[in-house]
Every structure is written in C-alpha cells, then in structure tokens.
Image (cartoon, coloured by chain):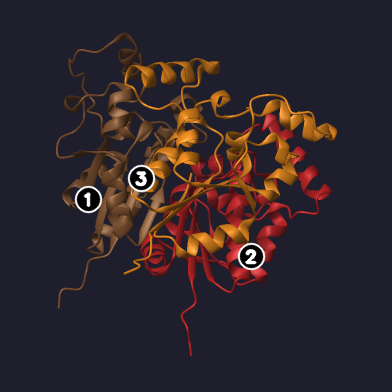
Chain colours: A red, B orange, C brown
C-alpha cells in the first residue's frame, strides 16, 4: 500500500546563521519523519553551501568582491540579531555545545546523511559569480521551475 | 456533517515588533474565521512571550547576558526597519492609536482570547536560557516534532 | 475537463530589493506555469508598489515623515545584506544587466503582464499614510480576510 510520502520544501534566502539553523532543524526533523525534504538555497542562503577553503576559479572583479565579502560556508555566517561583530555567533556556538545541540555545520552534515535534497539556485550562482567547484559536494543545481515543481507537491513550504 | 476545520501554522522566528504584528494579525484573522491556528515561537520570536517584569530565576552568565540584551515582551520589541533607536516603534504605536488599530500587546491578548495555540520552542528556551516562569501564562511548550505534526495538517504554513 | 488551476500566494512584508526580487521571481515563475498567483504587499513591502514621482496628497506630519523615509518604488529599494549605503543595489543591478537577468522594476512589469494579482494591504496604507494615488495603477486593495481567502485555496503560501 504505497502511501505517498509527505513533502516539505524550504527556500533558504537568508545568509544568517540563526535562520539557516532554523531551516536545517525543520528540514532534519521532517526527514527524520521520513518525509521528502528539499532546501533551495538562493541569494545569501547560497553561502551555507560554500566550501570553507579557497577554490581557485576565474572570476570578474565584482564576482571576486562578492566572493570576498560573503561568508565561506556555515561556520562563517553571522547572526540576524545580536551579531556584535562575530561575538554573537560564538555565544550561540558556546550554548549549543553546552546543551549538546548541533551546530550549523553539523546540521548540514546530518541533512546530507538523511537524504535532504540540497539545491543551489543557478540564477543566484550566475549573479553572484559562484561556481559549482566552490560549493560543497553532493548538491543539486536548479532554478525556479525545479522549486515550483517540488513546492506544488508539498504540504509544507517555507521561505526563510 | 463534521467538516474538518482549516488549519494555519506560523513559525515566529523574528523578534521584530513589525514582523510579530504581521504574524498576530494573520493568526487572529484566521482564528476569527474559525480556523485552528498555532504560532510556534522560536529563536528571537520567543521574546514576544516574555513577561515584562523581572522574574528571579537561576541562570548562568551567558543566559543572563541573553536575557538582558533581548526585549522583555511585545511592548519592548523594535522594528525591522527604521527603528531609529526606539523612535520608530513609538511612531508606529502613535499611528496605531490614531487609526484605532491594535498594538502588539493587544494582538497577543486577542490571540489568547480566540484560542490561538501559542507554543514556545523548547530548544530555543534551552539555548537562550529562558525558563517557563519567564514566559506568559497559557502557552504550550513544544519542539520541532510538535510543529511538524501541526504543519502537515495545515493549509497555510508561514515562517515569519 | 476543467482541472482546477493551482494557486500560489506570497505575502511581501519586506521592503528589501533582494527579497522583493525573490518574491517576484517565484511569482512570475508560477504565473508562467499558468498558476493563479497573488502577492499581498504589507508593511515595508508596500513600497514596491509606490510610484516613483511625487504625488501631491494631503498628509499629516508622521505620514509625511514615513513617506519621505521609505523608498519610492522598486528602483529605490536597498539590499537586506551588503547594502553599503546604496552601493550594493548598484552592484546587483550591474550583474543583473551583465547576465541579461531582469531588474526588480522589470520583474514588477512582467508580473502585471502575466496577470499576477497585486494586492496592497489597506491596513498598512492606513498606518503609513499611503494613499491609492501614490501606488502604481492596476493593483487591488485588500485586507487580511482577502489574503486568508486566497491562501486557503493555494498549494504554496510564502511569507517574504
């Protein structure tokens, strides 16, 4: 009796550590309940998929500037509130460890392990000059059409 | 003919007065149309449930710092735009009175009266060191599993 | 065989250029797939519907102040991140042109051409003192009841 699996989609627009945490906590929770889960990373959210190390790729001037100014991966992202020049994320990381909760990089890893589909928005990659080699492995690339296809089948659709 | 009631869920992540107002206006509207409505308060959104008065509870150093820096209840929250060091919220409160609209604390009261389910995210309470005694009465406590259960049955799910 | 058209609703709360772009890209994509799409412009999002030119209307002092401080239309909006006093939007506009992508004002035009329903939140208009004459032509006015009616019939509901 193949009951259809429930679906959840999340657009992660934000490049803030706290909002990305919320997105991955919901995504991992839904995946744990055996749902199909997709996160679309668009605009600043794409930074959560960047590799931490520098990847040598050819870029124009503006693209280099964007790459330099934007956080390289989840461990470099700031808070949407009380960032205090980077002190806020350290405070959050401290209480996360204290309470045995998961940090953002750990949440990203868990999502990959659980089969959460991670889709990088190709339009944003073009605009900000981010190339596939600069993003972590095991992700998909897609546009708004791919998102809409998934979202229309889903019970829960969030924009974060 | 027991037709099933429509459901709406809102995740209130934001600690901004204007975003909280939007959340409560939608929630109260849906409740007025006899829908089941749940608001999950997570991260900075949890501040909308804090009591205004100081509640003496034991806390660690970081938890005290968080408690001090975050707004105590809806009447202390700032705007996401044009906050101007607290002048913006005063301007908004002024036009709200002028137009006989409801202020955020009044919207919270109305939500409780209408039976909107207000759920404080237990993980956030742990991380930020907020204790049940510091939150207003008549709310529920829950985690991401509770949220997902409600959201999958709902027609409208928003992340604010 | 009249299959019902799928519906998408978006609440555009944000007055940021990048978030408004995301809203319109999703809306235009859904409309291209022949869906019924509605965008509700509330709070700062309403600025995306303002005419660029000054419209002489009678206003109180606070309403004049709001009108002056808020961006007049999509081409005046700033970025949610890396705004750099207006340099960020110029950088984005530059890469948009370079990649033959659409600017926010073009996305708004396309949405109107495709029949996306653009609804200005009347409560926000009251609060911020924006009058119908100050908003672009071809839009609807509505409140939270209108939004809830549309959202309950929709597959995809986003708050941006």
Residue situated in front as seen by the camera: B55 or A132? B55
User: Label 2 belongs to which residue?
Assistant: A111
Which percent across, then down, holds residue C57? 18, 15
Please name which of the two marks, 3 or 2, marks the residue nearer to the observer: 3
- The chain letter under disc 1 is C
Q: Is mark 3 on a helix, strand or loop?
A: helix
- Pick the quarter of the image with the C terminus of chain C: top left
Q: Is mark 1 on a helix, strand or loop?
A: loop
* Whether residue C77 is visible: yes
* Whether residue B80 is visible: no
Residue sitting at 42 percent across and 21 percent down?
Answer: B92
User: Is B108 situated above or below B42?
Assistant: above
Q: Residues within 10 Å of mark 2 (few under 14, many from 20)?
A: many
Residue sitting at 66 percent across and 29 percent down?
Answer: B70
Question: Is mark 3 in CB contact (under 8 Å) with mark 1?
Answer: no
Which percent across, then down, holds residue C26? 35, 54
User: Label 3 belongs to which residue?
Assistant: B32
Label tally:
3
User: Label 1 belongs to which residue?
Assistant: C116
State left or right for residue C156 relative to residue B127.
Answer: left
User: Is A129 situated above or below C46?
Assistant: below
C-alpha gap between disc 3 and disc 1: 27 Å
Q: Is mark 2 on a helix, strand or loop?
A: helix
C-alpha gap between disc 3 and disc 2: 38 Å
Q: How crowded is mark 3: few (under 14 residues within 10 Å), some or many (20 or more)?
A: some
Which percent across, then down, holds residue C51? 22, 28
- The chain letter under disc 2 is A
Residue sitting at 66 percent across and 31 percent down?
Answer: A82
């Amino acid at each position: 009796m193949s009951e259809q699996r429930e679906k959840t989609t999340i657009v992660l627009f934000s490049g803030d550590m706290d909002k990305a945490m919320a997105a991955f906590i919901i995504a991992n929770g839904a995946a744990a309940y055996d749902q199909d889960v997709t996160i679309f990373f668009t605009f600043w959210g794409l930074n959560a998929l960047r590799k931490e190390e520098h990847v040598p790729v050819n870029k124009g001037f503006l693209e280099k500037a964007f790459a330099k100014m934007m956080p390289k991966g989840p461990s470099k992202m700031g808070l949407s509130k009380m960032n205090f020049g980077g002190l806020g994320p350290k405070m959050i990381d401290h209480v996360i460890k204290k309470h045995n909760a998961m940090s953002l990089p750990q949440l990203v890893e868990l999502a990959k392990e659980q089969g959460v589909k991670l889709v990088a928005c190709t339009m944003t990659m073009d605009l900000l000059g981010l190339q596939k080699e600069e993003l972590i492995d095991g992700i998909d690339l897609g546009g708004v059409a791919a998102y809409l296809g998934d979202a229309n089948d889903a019970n829960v659709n969030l924009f974060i």
